[in-house]
Image (cartoon, rainbow, N blue to C red):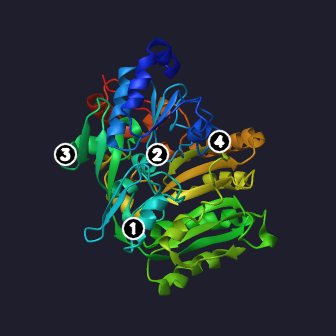
């Protein structure tokens, strides 16, 4: 059993003091007035109390934190944006290595690359790159941290055209469990670089990410909603249309409840299904792209138009601020069978105003990378599904949890078997193995080389191979 920070202080009162003296950032402890703010996570369903929070100012602080945790046998969690659904950005009684103050970004517009520190959010990256008419692949909420999303694989509005986030990762600087700083790329520590691309936080603390950027400036995007009773008709159409659509066309399928402003008042509270569009082709061609969706069923509402790419990236930010209750389950999906669609119809009316189901396309460019080229193992899937029970009221915790679990259970037999690890709660080794499939044993071997004592185990853990 790991040592707690309290036990360490009781047994060696100078250890924490010595660490604090050598630390340039801020070391926050439970009796500090800002402790509760510092320990809070995006998912308010998770309530962890670390023994200490090391808010790192630089790479030297990260090295010192990792060495301190290892030398004193403390559980250590790594925090970037704090959006982890199961709360893996924190740990009870141990040390949180908080990277949120490390927010440097440098864009090279000629090379179309960006170097990003791990405390950045994707909104930070979008802002910096958009000044040059560039972007890279990320998620759909701009407050998400760069670190967790990237290490889990990363998919979003640009995925069909430019692949996963990890397909655009060029290199990474990593603090290993023994305190060494290494550079990982195709040419340096290639086995580590392979594992970082989808293997989560198992292998070290990434202190710098280098991404490929692409010419993305203005897109045509926004929501299109149908009445919920059109779910079967529209999803049957969507399953045939999406895989054949040009890669400039991205549209994820959703079920939801229409929120308040800026939507028309008469639609507030309506249960809907629909699409969230992001079209990167010529704006003049957008109407031709959108019309088939209008023809399959008359939209209840649509607000699709030209906008800067950062605007669509941040569209959900206000709807999903930090502090809501979250419970989500995910699966990769190769095809939407009639039986699966029937289950979507059965569970389609979401239980609370913020709960939702999304089917994110992960075909196109993703399929042009082989399963064994990165740790991501489901290159043949067509969608990454998430069922998210969300509500600000703790009294609705069980309602959203049970809806998500029952919905997922009904659909799991129709899935590809594994899940995007960033859409998993704390679901155990069997689910982790299912997610990595044939890559799991190789990941265990890389883990044994770079973290043989499993120092980094507060994550979707892969134990070192024997």
Q: Nearer the viewer, residue 10 or 83?
A: 10
The percent coordinates of residue 62 (x first, y second) are 36, 38
Instruction: Work out which residue is located at the far bottom of the displayed protein and give it.
Output: 284
Check the image and name the residue furthest to the right: 266
Q: Earlier in the sequence, mark 3 or mark 4?
A: 4
Dot 3 and dot 4 residues touching (CB under 8 Å): no
Tell me the tag on residue 129.
1
Q: Which mark is residue 386?
A: none
Q: CA distance from mark 3 to mark 2?
A: 24 Å
Q: CA distance from mark 3 to mark 1?
A: 26 Å
* Residue closest to the eye, 60 or 223: 60
Which residue is denoted by mark 2 in the rendering? 80
Please determine whether, in this image, residue 174 is positioned above or below residue 145: above
Residue 69 appearing in the image = no
Q: Alpha-carbon distance for marks 3 and 4?
A: 40 Å
In this picture, residue 39 sits left or right of residue 61:
right
Q: Is residue 139 left or right of residue 181?
A: right
């Amino acid at each position: 059993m790991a040592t707690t920070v309290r036990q360490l202080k009781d047994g060696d009162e100078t250890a924490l003091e010595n660490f604090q003296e050598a630390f340039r950032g801020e070391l926050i402890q439970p009796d500090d007035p800002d402790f509760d703010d510092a320990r809070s996570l995006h998912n308010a369903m998770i309530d962890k109390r670390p023994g200490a929070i090391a808010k790192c100012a630089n790479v030297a602080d990260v090295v010192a934190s990792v060495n301190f945790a290892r030398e004193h046998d403390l559980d250590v969690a790594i925090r970037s944006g704090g959006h982890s659904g199961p709360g893996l950005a924190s740990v009870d009684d141990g040390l949180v290595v908080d990277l949120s103050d490390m927010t440097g970004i440098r864009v090279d517009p000629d090379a179309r690359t960006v170097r990003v520190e791990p405390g950045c959010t994707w909104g930070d990256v979008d802002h910096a790159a958009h000044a040059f008419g560039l972007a890279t692949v990320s998620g759909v909420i701009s407050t998400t941290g760069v670190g967790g999303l990237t290490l889990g694989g990363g998919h979003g509005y640009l995925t069909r055209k430019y692949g996963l986030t990890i397909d655009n990762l060029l290199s990474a600087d990593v603090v290993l469990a023994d305190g060494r700083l290494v550079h990982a790329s195709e040419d340096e520590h290639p086995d580590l670089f392979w594992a970082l691309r989808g293997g989560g936080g198992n292998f070290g603390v990434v202190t710098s990410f280098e991404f490929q950027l692409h010419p993305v400036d203005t897109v045509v995007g926004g929501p299109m909603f149908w009445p919920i009773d059109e779910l079967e008709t529209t999803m049957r159409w969507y399953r045939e249309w999406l895989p054949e659509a040009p890669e400039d066309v991205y549209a994820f399928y959703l079920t939801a409840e229409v929120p308040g402003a800026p939507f028309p008042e008469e639609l507030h509270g309506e249960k809907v299904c629909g699409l969230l569009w992001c079209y990167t082709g010529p704006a003049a061609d957008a109407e031709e792209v959108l019309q088939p969706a209008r023809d399959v069923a008359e939209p209840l509402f649509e607000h699709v138009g030209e906008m800067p790419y950062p605007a669509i990236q941040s569209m959900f930010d206000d709807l999903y601020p930090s502090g809501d209750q979250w419970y989500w389950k995910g699966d990769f999906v190769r095809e939407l069978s009639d039986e699966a669609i029937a289950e979507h119809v059965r569970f389609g009316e979401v239980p609370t105003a913020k709960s939702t189901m999304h089917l994110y396309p992960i075909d196109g460019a993703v399929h042009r990378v082989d399963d064994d080229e990165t740790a991501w193992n489901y290159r043949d899937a067509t969608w990454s599904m998430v069922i998210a029970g969300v509500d600000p009221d703790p009294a609705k915790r069980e309602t959203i949890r049970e809806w998500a679990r029952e919905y997922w259970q009904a659909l799991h037999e129709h899935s590809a078997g594994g899940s995007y690890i960033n859409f998993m709660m704390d679901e155990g080794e069997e689910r982790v193995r299912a997610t990595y499939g044939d890559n799991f044993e190789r990941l265990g071997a890389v883990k044994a080389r770079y973290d043989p004592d499993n120092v980094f185990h507060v994550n979707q853990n892969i134990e070192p191979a024997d």
